[in-house]
Amino acid sequence: MDETYDVVVIGGGAAGLSGALALGRARRSVAVVDDGTPRNAPAHEMHNYLGRDGTPPAELRSAGRAEVAGYGVALVDDRVTAVGGSAGSFTVETAGGRVLGARRLLVTTGLVDELPDVPGVRELWGTDVLHCPYCHGWEVRDQPIGVLATGPMAVHQALLWRQLSGDVVLFRHGAVLSGEEAEQLAARGVTVLEGPVATLETDGGRLSGVRLADGEVVPRAAVVVTPRFTARSAVLAGLGLEAVPFEMGPHVVGSRIPADPRGATAVPGVWVAGNVADPGAQVIGAAAAGLMAGAQINADLVAEETWAAVEVVRAQADPEFGEAWWEERYRSHGSGAWSGRVNDVLAAEAAELPPGRALDAGAGEGGDAVWLARRGWEVTALDLSRTALDRAAAAARSAGVRIETRHADVTAWEPGEERWDLVTASFLHLLPDRRDDVLRRLAAAVAPGGTLLVTAHDGGDCSRGVQRPGLPGWYATGEQMAAVLDPADWAVEAAETRPRDARGHEHGSVHVADTVLRARRRQSSSSRV
């Protein structure tokens, strides 16, 4: 896994960037993956976007990318090739070989306009070949317009465009009109030409007319077609999301990914917005849908994090619940809940210490304990979870070393008469009403001349938008931890906050901070802490 984010947005158009903007402003870690092929690229301008009417699509996209980047959103210029996993642990693979992890997904891949197979249509698409009177009609008002009947919406199109020009011709092109439809067209003054269309004629790269199969050329300034709107949804097949027919009135005119009004799909953790969900949405509608989906994703994550915080409080207040909670956490991560690497602070602070006896309190799956054992320490790994301890022992065997494992709740554990030359605890977080008591007992386990090393998350991470369970007050400063120690017995060598770049387990690369306490027990120490 190269990077892990709260949300990965697949597609960087109006919907995707609007969703990313909402999420970035909510201090979420977000990546937008986009291959740079927006549907509206051929269009010179976009319309009906209040305050931005007439803006070139590329200009809106560029401005949107700059805005989301200002809120820390990562922009990945690549094409997504596969999506897998489930809520909380999605994987997004790209053509460039990157693998992104995500707790949630927002898919805004848009659609493909499948155009009629008439020579000249594709070449003039988005300039003189049009489909939406609201998007492009004003620009060709009062000009000669042709409507190519290649789909069930042709008569509807002709009547809409007649609102914009008194010279509208419907090229029947083999389509069958009902008597009622013919009557409507005649009543509105729309001319119907029977012959099939052979090609579109151009002059200087612009449309000049429509050539019929019999050779007649009908001068036109614009031609209207009805594409089939096909959702760009193949990448979602790995999640079990399949497109369904998209209907306009009684006619099926394309496909879409079904979702509720706020963008949630049938797959937990996956939202959609924009044309992939609503092929009829214009740019402003797609942007609004992306904003709504982004807000809903953030609310979903907040609910998850709140429940997780409640469970943390329960786990620390109720030993029986706590043990069951940790067992479930480890078992649910079959390949390991943590990275297996040594904590950076331990590696730096213990590198020059002479090996002796070491106690790793809250050892988890043994990353720190194995590192110490490989450097000659006699290690005792203590943890509440038997599953974690079994994994720690297995990791030690794989490394060719031995560690002792002890199953105990550190909040109730007593060292007795045992002493260790190094007592270390990495990211062992406790509620404030228990923290000092546990620190005192860990300190009591340090032999004279030995070292106490405690590393924790800094409470300031919470105010910087890093997702941590609980409140900033749950996380002690170095000074608060050092205050537990009796200066007569202890020499505090470090009590500080250290910034670093975190990568992996919970987030992508993000600036965080660690609280570090390192203290040496004096050789003449009494039994006091």
Image (cartoon, helix red, strand yellow):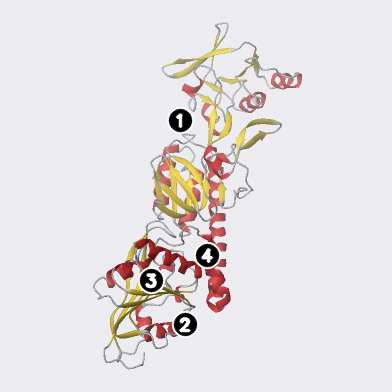
Residue 192: give x, y in percent of width and height. 65, 15
Is 106 placed above or below 235 here? below
Disc 3 target residue: 403
- Say what secondary structure mark 2 lies in: loop
Q: Disc 3 or disc 4, which is closer to the eye?
A: 3
The disc, 2 or 4, on the residue closer to the chain's N-terminal end is 4
The disc, 3 or 4, on the residue closer to the chain's N-terminal end is 4
Is 445 placed above or below 102 here? below
Q: 380 or 282, which is in the foreground?
A: 380
Q: How far is disc 2 from disc 1 in space, using C-alphas?
A: 69 Å
The disc, 2 or 1, on the residue closer to the chain's N-terminal end is 1
Badge 4 crowding class, 10 Å Cα cut-off, few under 14, some 14 to 19, many 20 or more, is some
Amino acid type of the residue that numbered disc 1 sits on in the rendered structure: Pro
Residue 153: give x, y in percent of width and height. 65, 26
Q: Quadrant of the C terminus?
A: bottom left
Q: 389 or 362, which is in the foreground?
A: 389
Disc 4 target residue: 329
